[in-house]
Image: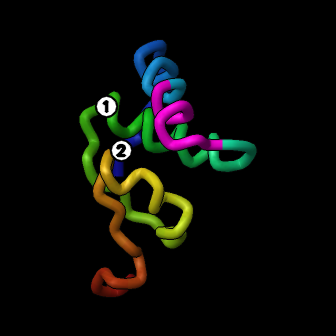
Amino acid sequence: MRLLTDSEPAWDRLRSLIETHGCLGKQIHDANVVATALTAGVRRLVTANVGDFTRFASEIEVIDLATLPDG
């Protein structure tokens, strides 16, 4: 696991994701996770909440935690 931090490029990416995917309200938090990951070069996201990230499937690979061994 890597700890990623916000940065100006991540904020720029977040604004782009919000516009591209029409994020509103709490969806912006999910977009922020994706923006921060993409800016850091992370292309896969493991989550127990796959549905929250479906809209970003063209941007990042989303892996369901439940499908992993010992998940």
Residue type pointed to by label 1: Ala
Give SS at disc 1: loop
The residue lying at 44 percent from left, 35 percent from top is 35
Q: Amino acid at mark 2?
A: Arg
Residue 51, image x and y in percent? Answer: 52, 69
Q: Residues within 10 Å of mark 1 (few under 14, many from 20)?
A: some
Query: Does 43 appear in magenta?
Result: no
Viewer-nearest residue: 20 or 10: 20
Q: Is residue 62 above or below residue 66?
A: above
Q: Is residue 68 left or right of residue 19?
A: left
**Which secondary structure lies at badge 2?**
loop
Tags 1 and 2 in contact by the CB under 8 Å rule?
Answer: yes
Residue at point 41% right, 83% down?
66
Q: CA distance from mark 1 to mark 2?
A: 10 Å
In magenta, the rendered stretch is 16-23
Q: Residues within 10 Å of mark 2 (few under 14, many from 20)?
A: few
Instruction: Report the residue marked by disc 2.
Output: 2
The residue beneath circle 1 is: 40
Where is residue 70 drawn, in percent x and y?
35, 86
Camera-side residue: 69 or 55?
55
Residue at the top extreme of this rendering: 8
